[in-house]
Image (cartoon, grey):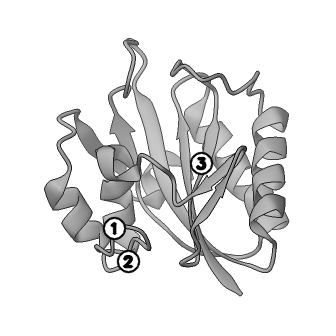
Amino acid sequence: MIRLYILLGGNLGDKSRIFSEARDKLEKRLGEINSLSAVYETEPWGFESSDLFWNQVLEFKTILSPEEVLWQTQQTEIELGRISKSNQYDSRIIDVDILFYGDQVISQPNLIIPHPRIQERKFALIPLCEIAPYLLHPVFRKNMIRLLEECTDQLNVKKISDLDEVHL
């Protein structure tokens, strides 16, 4: 079994329902959810929008390959109404990013693990620190606490719930 870390993000629609459906679908497809962070409300990263994002990190135990995980996460996005992934940042119903797949480093045209910008994004690092503070980044050889301390992202990230507060 491989420990897999996934980031959910979205700023459109009924976020509570969408996140709940995403977790259910991903658990059926990827394997058991071992741990999950609270939900955080965050400002958009890389673009302007009046709609704030929700973000949450999920830790799975999976037997799927990285490529199978990618396919399953993309299918989940499509089923939940994601139109398409563009190279530009924009508002979206749901985004499912693979952050870590064990301690593997993968660099393929359609799949880069660990996520290439995790160290720049408080909205990923803060929930990761909640559930896996000592997880070691296999490239930088630093844990999540250290990466968060070094992160220069100035956007607001606010914990909005523990799981039972938002009907998750």
Please tell me whether residue 117 is drawn above or below residue 155 in the rendered image. below
- Of labels 3 and 1, earlier in sequence is 3
Name the mark on residue 18.
none
Task: Give the amino acid at mark 1.
Answer: Phe
Residue assigned mark 1? 140
Asked which quadrant contains residue 149, the reply is bottom left
Name the mark on residue 136.
2
Please tell me whether mark 3 sits on a helix, a strand or a loop. Answer: strand
Residue 32 placement (x, y as % from top left): 71, 76
Q: Residues within 10 Å of mark 3 (few under 14, many from 20)?
A: some
Q: Nearer the viewer, residue 54 or 132?
A: 132
Q: Residue at the spot x=83%, y=51% of the render?
A: 71
Q: CA distance from mark 3 to mark 1?
A: 19 Å
* Residue contact at pointers 1 and 2, CB within 8 angstroms: no
Residue assigned mark 3? 97
Nearest to viewer (mark 1 / mark 2): 1
Q: Quadrant of the N terminus?
A: bottom right
Q: Residues within 10 Å of mark 2 (few under 14, many from 20)?
A: some
In screen coordinates, is 161 left or right of 122? Answer: right
Q: Residue at the spot x=39%, y=63% of the render?
A: 128
Please tell me whether mark 2 sits on a helix, a strand or a loop. Answer: loop
In screen coordinates, is 148 left or right of 54? Answer: left
Q: CA distance from mark 1 to mark 2?
A: 8 Å
- Of labels 2 and 3, earlier in sequence is 3
Q: CA distance from mark 2 to mark 3?
A: 18 Å
